[in-house]
Image (cartoon, rainbow, N blue to C red):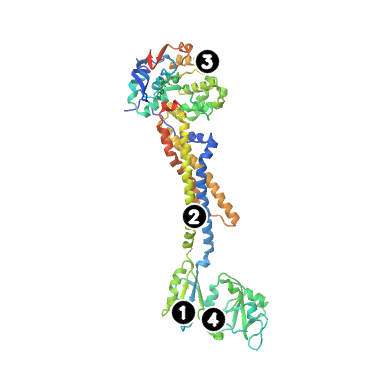
Amino acid sequence: MTAPVIEFRGVGLTYPGPPAVAALRPCDLRVPRGEFVTVVGPSGSGKSTFLNVAGLLDSPTCGRYLLDGIDTAALPDRSRAALRGRRIGFVFQAFHLLPHRSALENVTLAMLYTEVPRKERLVRAREVLAQVGLAHRADAVPGRLSGGERQRVAIARALVGRPSLLLCDEPTGNLDSANAASVLALLDELHGAGMTVVVITHDPGVAARGHRTVTLHDGRLRA
Amino acid sequence: MTPPVRTTRLSARDTLSEALAGILRRPGRAVLTALGTVLGVGSFVAVLGLTATLSSRIDGRFNLLTATEVSVQDVAAEHDEFAGPAFPADAEQRLRQVAGIAHAGVLWTVRLDPGTAVGSLPTGAGAGAAEGGAGGGGTAVVAASPGAVAALAPTLRQGRLYDEFAERTHQRVAVLGSGVADRLGITTLATRPVVHIGQEPFTVAGIIADVERRPEHLLSVLVPRATAEELWGPPGPASASLLIDTELGAARQVAGLVPLALRPDHPEYLKAVPPPDPRVLRSGVTSDLSALFLLLAGICLVIGAVGIANTTLVAVLERTGEIGLRRALGARGRHVWAQFLTESAALGALGGLVGTALGELTVVGVSLVRDWTPVIHPATVAAAPLAGLLTGLLAGLHPAWRAARIEPAEALRR
Ligand SMILES: Nc1ncnc2c1ncn2[C@@H]1O[C@H](COP(=O)(O)OP(=O)(O)OP(=O)(O)O)[C@@H](O)[C@H]1O
Ligand SMILES: [Mg+2]
């Protein structure tokens, strides 16, 4: 049997402050390979904090976090960077697209650090942009894209590195129902292909798509 | 411990293309950032170029001729009123012993009695002032040994110079400067023309078109030294001088040896004047002119560096989100560091290139206006963009370090 993709053992994160904020209280969580988990909770409940910890962008202040069975606490910075680059795909709440680069270049950026040859980067980026229905906007800069189009570029960037874990912070937050439906269909498809997906949302409709919904309230996680 | 996954990497080519994209996608900002370096490097090149141009002009003035000329003055009268002429009669023979001398000879302007003039016809006592009296034409009679004539480096228009034989046999021959020949209307030697100095007739042996030293002698009649001494007596105190044409590089050494070779008893009677040392003059120009400007250029470059450092630091803070994103996509701190450092170095190099071009334009422009030949050392042209690159590199160190230290989660929250 393989190790779960995410395994929290008493993981918690307190921002030192002052005043100290217990953004994520110590909790246990297991997300087995191939699962589709949704995380819900009110604003400020610690959803983005949870995602940062799960994505190795932030280190927990207590507990042990095992990613794919690897104890991440002992890892040097270069291994954390490598895990982020090669195994995890991020879709951020604020997109974080580079404003002066085209959609295509923004997507290729996800392969810059993982030794994908330059030519292949372009080919793959075009493929994934087509997959999210943006083939015709590949050369536009983010400033010329609609909110929904930007979100889809961000999703394309998260997918293009073929991660084993996809972490999405409000991936449908800016989309109308039609676009949201197509993004959700895409997530379903990826999950169907074996990808482990964690989606943060406050939309009950989106939350219902997951196998399992985890609730956050005041930093307290309930599986 | 072996890492559980292959570490990420950023190839040199990708680092460069990311850095260039960072610059080229925001050209306006890049120009402003690099402006200081452009000005600094530009003024460096301009100052060095103008200095090189000026010193080459000085070098030009110190051409071969001036560098190989030594003149020796008779200063005997300063030491002893009754010393008499300082140059021995056999001066030229003695100088054969000194190495490094090509031509040498004694010459002086003959003091003629009032009323004695140079003309086609006899003049002087009883004859009255003839055509072209001494005052009007200003024709000087110069006693010059054959060696002295050769040391003038003359170009003949017609005829020949008188030789040692003419000197030894006290011949009445003369070589005319072109100015004198023109004034006397002597155009050809085919008619064996004669000039009179006072009553004394001299056969014209040759006409000098030009001399490379002492151009005043183009207005003189040159006669053999021995002839002059026989007719008009020895040179007056302090009127004779010795002109020496030395071999290249020997001038200073010759100047040191000659007084002793000619007057071992009283070397102080002779004062040898070597050519000025061009190196001394050039370094004088360099230190006077360019030290200040180089300082200013240096200040410009420092300002340029501070400018790049500031703008890059602002860019780092502004691009915190980008840094966080790159870290999320697998970039290590050192990748971020390399990217920002390369960006600032590339900006510096670009500024250096533009500055070099502007500096060269300045040198060429100034030279054009002043009618100089612009000289820029290749080393300056090669080093200037490197100076820009170095400036950018140094300026980028701190911002790049700051960028590398930004925590990914912190950066993404912006
Ligand atoms: N760097 C920080 N220092 C101190 N407190 C922080 C910091 N970052 C977040 N917090 C606090 O931690 C709590 C959880 O924040 P988080 O961003 O995880 O909320 P969230 O659930 O993602 O909210 P939203 O739905 O609005 O995005 C909040 O109370 C927030 O103010
Ligand atoms: Mg959030």
Upstream in sequence: badge 1 or badge 4: 1
Q: Nearer the viewer, residue A110 or B356?
A: B356
Task: Assign a secondary structure to mark 1.
Answer: helix
Can see residue B323?
yes
- The part of the image, by quadrant, that contains residue B179 is bottom right
Percent coordinates x, y for residue B134 in the rendering:
63, 80
Q: Which residue is mark 4?
A: B225
How packed mark 1 is, by other alpha carbons closer than 10 Å (few <14, some 14-19, many 20 or more), is many
For mark 4, name the chain: B
Q: CA distance from mark 3 to mark 4?
A: 115 Å
Q: Is residue B35 above or below residue A17?
A: below
For mark 3, name the chain: A
Q: Amino acid at mark 4?
A: Arg
For mark 2, name the chain: B
Q: Which residue is mark 2?
A: B290
Q: Amino acid at mark 2?
A: Ser
Q: Which residue is mark 1?
A: B76
Residues under numbered marks 1 and 2 in contact, where contact means CB atoms less than 8 Å apart: no
